[in-house]
Amino acid sequence: MRLVVKVGTSTLAHSTGNLNIRRVEALCKVLSDIKNAGNEILLVSSGATGMGSGKLGLLKRPEDISTKQAAAAVGQCELMYTYDKLFQQYNHCVAQVLLTRADIEDDSRRANLHSTFSRLLDFRVLPIINENDSVATEEFFIGENDSLAALVSTLVDADLIILLSDIDGLFTADPHKDQEAKLISRVEEITPELRALGGGAGSDFGSGGMSAKLNAAQIAMDAGCDMIIANGEHPEILYDIMAGEEVGTRFVARHEKKTGAAVR
């Protein structure tokens, strides 16, 4: 299978913004094992701005553009150093790919990206993708990495997208506030009622939320690709997904994959 796995800041980092070393080590080990089984993996990783904020001593995600870009520049170094070191232990080579919305929307850049990803996968490299927060400006923001993961999946004709978050999936209500909330295990259509369940960002250092994940699911489903939201607290859950077990919330595409689906 060709998988796009997205991991959020809340999974990668502690509430301080500093790296959750044990969890990141487990994630790299599991992804390496899945890759060893013959699967292709593209990792969309948040965390640069959050880690940079922690390293700079900021107490929360910066709000102004220049500070956010500075934090991303600092954090991206640490993030990629960590991934390179951990994946190298399992004999896997990684590559960094930083994107802006313009890279996705422009036909020429999009074609070049497709060629680059294809060649990297030919070499059995594991691409690690993030928004280029250090240089992006407001008008080019992709918005958050959930949608970026879905857009990347359309570029590489992925078989499945997995969003690892700090929640088990989509619930009938906010499970942090309502004990009666029930997990929705399967979604075949994103209705206005489902969109009403979307909330805000999950942490002080994150930018996504359930609303962002629903946007990503719509992009994926329109392109003919299934998407799963699962809890990334224990990365070993990826084994269960690969074994076909019912995990988290699966958004089911109702038609065949469309290569090069339009950006929304």
Image (spheres, rainbow, N blue to C red):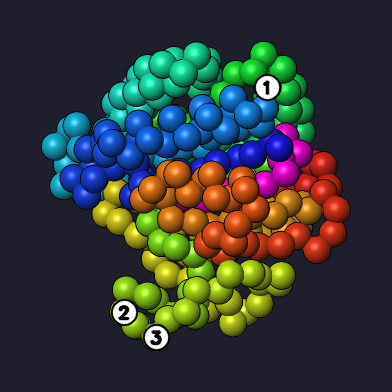
Which tag is nearer the camera, tag 1 or tag 3? 3
Name the disc covering residue 177, or none.
Answer: 2
Mark found first going from the N terminus, 1 or 3: 1
Q: Which residue is the site of mark 1? A: 121
Find the magenta span and give its range. 154-164
| Secondary structure beneath label 3 | loop
Quadrant of the image occupied by residue 16: top left
Quadrant of the image occupied by residue 115: top right
**Do residues under tags 2 and 1 come within 8 Å of each other at their CB atoms?**
no
The residue lying at 57 percent from left, 64 percent from top is: 249
Q: Which residue is the site of mark 3? A: 180
* Identity, as a three-letter code, of the amino acid under mark 3: Glu
Of 110 and 165, which appears nearest the observer? 165
Q: Is residue 98 magenta?
A: no
- Separation of disc 2 and disc 1 at Cα? 43 Å
From the top left corner, tell me how far across and down residue 175 is, in percent. Answer: 37, 75
